Image: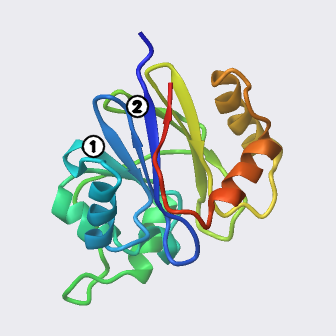
Amino acid sequence: MLMAVRMTVLASGSRGNCTVLSSDNSSVLVDAGISCRETLKRMRGAGEDPQKLKAIVISHEHNDHVAGLQVLARKLQIPVYITEATYQSWRRSTKDPEGKPAKLERREHFQPGRSFMIADIMVMPFTIPHDAADPCGFTFKASGVKVAVVTDLGYMPANVKENLETAYRALGGKMSLFQSASVTLALQDKPLQPITLG
């Protein structure tokens, strides 16, 4: 029996980015661009259990992707997956309560192009074009379902298109890249609703 994968966009845009990707057994938070309090509130409102979170995965260091990271990581006591360059850039621009460069106690560094596992979810990071230290998009695979999360694209280079197409093929090729972009744009101003695939 094919299990479901659920993707819930908690925030998207210049005021904050935050997405929950859940399998039957675990969840991953992609970016932490809104406050800890707001993230947890929105998760509960969407029916997502914060206790299922196994990790936070960061795409890049811009504030609309990391504004709530420090508090959220400390409160939930879960690891943060981040590239070394993104982590160092984030540390330079973020201070702890004592005014020192911020640090994450539980962090794992990943490299674009090298997959890794978080519980039962396989994560494949890939490089995207953006003005950040080491920006990444991701595909996530769990329970036989593959989805992609990519933000801040000015254009779509071949490697990004290839990673997105593998997610669409995994869904049976039901939607072209153009159609899915149109659906996403049409839904931007609507209330946030979880999407369940599988």
Amino acid type for the residue under numbered disc 1: Lys
Residue drawn at x 50%, y 74% as measured from the top left: 64
Which mark is drawn over residue 54? 1
Q: Is residue 116 left or right of residue 71?
A: right
Question: Please, what secondary structure does the residue beneath circle 2 have?
Answer: strand
Label of residue 83 in the image: none
- Taking the view exactly as shown, the residue that stands out farthest to the bottom is 99
Mark closest to the chain's N terminus, 2 or 1: 1
Q: From what the image shows, is residue 8 above or below residue 25?
A: below
Q: Residue visible at 49% across and 72% down?
A: 16
Q: Is residue 43 above or below residue 68?
A: above
Look at the image and tell me whether residue 104 can be seen: no
Could you tell whether 144 is left or right of 73 in the image?
right
Q: Which one is in front, 153 or 130?
A: 153
Q: Residue at x 69, y 20 (%)?
A: 172
Instruction: Tell me: 175 left or right of 54.
Output: right
Mark 2–mark 1 Cα distance, whole angstroms, equals: 10 Å
Give the residue pinned by disc 2: 121
